[in-house]
Amino acid sequence: MSRIPRGFAFVLCRCGCGEVATIYDDHYRRKQGYRRGHSPSTRPPRRPCIAAECGNIALAHGLCSAHYNRVRRHGSLDDPRPPETERFWRKVRKEDGCWWWTGAVDGQYGRFWIGPRTQSGRIVQAHRYAYERLVGPIPDGLHIDHLCCNKLCVNPAHLEPVTGVENVQRGIRRARSGQPSMRPSKRKTGATSSDAQS
């Protein structure tokens, strides 16, 4: 660590290298205000975060901002969230017949984040996640049809894998027969499937 001149405050470089910061020359001070640390031309190369499966740039102590804040809050790099399946079932309300998804909704279907909170995680539809966990993998090229017409239902007894053409044809038949379609807005008002039919 370099020696701090007398009369200067102890300030670390903004780039995260850990060196004592110096103010840019007068030209930068006049044009862009006071800036601490390396100029862009002398900044050391950026290093990746040391946390496993993280490709973000390290900002402090070899960690990206997300992992640095996790260590500050929880004292560890381990994910403080409960396991994936436990998080999923916390967002399901089981009633007579339908199992209502109460988590995030994207359009008309429930959505659920799986995997770590980094770039390797992804969003899946809640009913597909439930079907894969309780029944088995969905064959390639097949869609999941809601037999109960409730698009927020994750009960595998109400889900059936069908081709895309069959799924559309069933939807047309249901619309012609006047069978109600449960929308997310009906969930928010507390209506049940029996209320919607009457």
Image: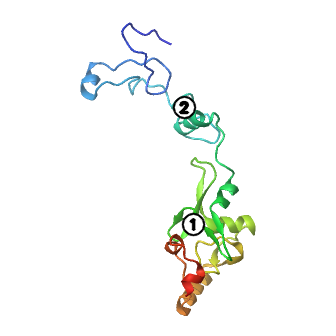
Q: Position of residue 107 (x, y in %)?
A: 50, 69
Query: Looking at the image, is mark 2 or mark 1 earlier in the sequence?
Result: 2
Q: Given the current orientation, which residue lies at the most extreme top position?
A: 6
Label 2 CA crowd tier, 10 Å (few <14, some 14–19, many 20+): some
* Residue type at tag 1: Gly
Answer with the quarter of the image where residue 93 lies. bottom right
Q: Is residue 160 shown above or below 32?
A: below
Q: Is residue 132 shown above or below 51?
A: below
Judge from the rendering whether residue 96 lies leftward or rightward of residue 111; answer left or right: right
Residue shown at 54% from the left, 31% from the top: 47
Q: Is residue 167 shown above or below 118?
A: below
Q: Which residue is mark 1?
A: 110
Q: Is residue 196 shown above or below 112?
A: below
Residue shown at 39% from the left, 15% from the top: 9
Answer with the quarter of the image where residue 122 lies. bottom right
Q: Nearer the viewer, residue 15 or 96?
A: 96
Judge from the rendering whether residue 138 lies leftward or rightward of residue 181; answer left or right: right
Q: Is residue 136 visible?
A: no
Q: Position of residue 144 (x, y in %)?
A: 64, 74
Q: Given the current orientation, which residue lies at the most extreme bottom position?
A: 177
Q: Which residue is mark 2?
A: 47
Q: Nearer the viewer, residue 15 or 105?
A: 105
Q: Position of residue 72 (x, y in %)?
A: 57, 33
Q: Nearer the viewer, residue 158 or 161?
A: 158
Q: Position of residue 180 (x, y in %)?
A: 55, 85
Answer with the quarter of the image where residue 191 lies. bottom right
* Residue type at tag 2: Arg
Q: Given the current orientation, which residue lies at the most extreme right position?
A: 135
